Image (cartoon, helix red, strand yellow):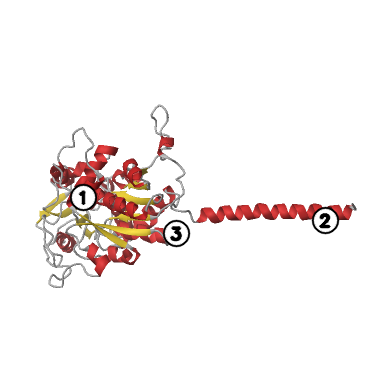
Amino acid sequence: MQWTDRSLLIGFVSGAALALILDHVRQYYTSTSKPSSKTQLRAQPEETISPSGINQIAPPPIGTGIESTIGSTPMIIIPSLSKITKCTILAKCEHLNGAGFSPKDRVALSIITRAERDGLLTPHSGDTIYEGTVGSTGISLATLCRAKGYQAHICMPNDQSHEKSNLLLKLGAVVERVPPAPIVDQEHFVNRARNLAKQHTADPTRPGRGYFANQFETEANWRTHYEGTGPEIYSQSAGNIAAFCAGAGTGGTISGVAAYLKQQNPEIKVILADPQGSGLYNKIKHGVMFHSLEREGTRRRDQVDTMVEGIGLTRSTVNFERGMDLIDDAIKITDQQAMNMARWLVERDGIFVGSSSAVNCVAALRTALELGPGHTVVTILCDSGNRHLSKFWGQIGDIGGEARTTLEDILEGRKLD
């Protein structure tokens, strides 16, 4: 064979081999750029604990102040729910944020930081932050106010658990417990806080200014979940998500997370978990919250509506409307279903959750059963049972030594003895 022919043959073979290699590389990146909801997670739970029982997950770097404990929360597989559904049920542990121990830590930090940036708040100047809240946002605000040099004044409905108001007082906040009222009433807890902030600013005898945090309507709410919670969920799950399930208290979490996840993969389903007494399920399913005789925004939410705290609305908000079109479906959860789920999680996983987390987990369970085996469903653990001892867990009672709650008990909402 002539040298020229040999060179041509070598060149041809080399080119073919290079093309084959490049094709394999292309296929690899194509397959990993849009991860399937059925592919395995990169780390299984048994890989994170050493044979001697030591957690092998690297600790975060040193931060400055309590603010540095907010965000970058763990995500866990819920073993019992994953086993019974043959899916992977992931829970983002937002109740482990380090200031107020709820996802409202992110919101409170975002609100304060943006207000300082815009010159609306000045640390150690006598400024007071006013907010109307069912408790969790107030606790986050009160904690950060102490850290950053502000006073917190919290208005909350008097049908919320006393654990929350007692904690607010321990954090140095001024607390007003007001009767439940429709949003059109000036004595509604949100309107009360707004008016007090205006009065403070207008009073020349009072130090500093009054600032209304406005968690229900501020852009800082949904954006902190779009910029923080959503990217964390997508990264921790390696993008392997079939559905995301969450309730809505202000609407910021579900709107912000949905906006981010849908940008990454439009096929991800977003499911609203809604407790009894709330109108958001009807808003998603039928376009209206309540019967035409009960005008939207005027309904009084009494304590008999639900035992669930922190999620559920009887009116629409700017934060909820921001992501409403991204919500694919809604699931209505009864109090009994939530209580049975809370029992189940303690009995089988040692996970002690509050009412909102229990609602979210029921929605995740039902979504996984509907999708079928092999899918990954993500939800939020937004509250610990520690703040629901007197009300929610007071109704559940003691667990005892046996795991006796069944799947049917949860799905059918059976009353347990």
Amino acid tagged 1? Gln
Q: CA distance from mark 1 to mark 3?
A: 32 Å
Amino acid tagged 3? Gln
Q: Secondary structure at mark 3?
A: helix
Left or right, 324 with reference to 3: left
Q: Quadrant of residue 323?
A: bottom left
Q: CA distance from mark 2 to mark 3?
A: 46 Å
Report x, y in % for residue 305: 13, 57
Q: Quadrant of residue 119?
A: bottom left
Circle nearer the N terminus (1, 2): 2
Mark identifier at residue 264: 3
Q: Is residue 139 visible?
A: no
Nearer-the-camera pick, 214 or 310: 310
Amino acid tagged 2? Leu
At x 32%, y 41%, the residue is 80
Left or right, 158 with reference to 82: left
Mark 1 or mark 2: which is in front? 1
Q: Is residue 364 visible?
A: yes
Nearer-the-camera pick, 72 or 22: 22
- Where is mark 1, residue-wise? 337
Mark 2 or mark 3: which is in front? 2
Circle nearer the N terminus (2, 3): 2
Nearer-the-camera pick, 356 or 401: 401
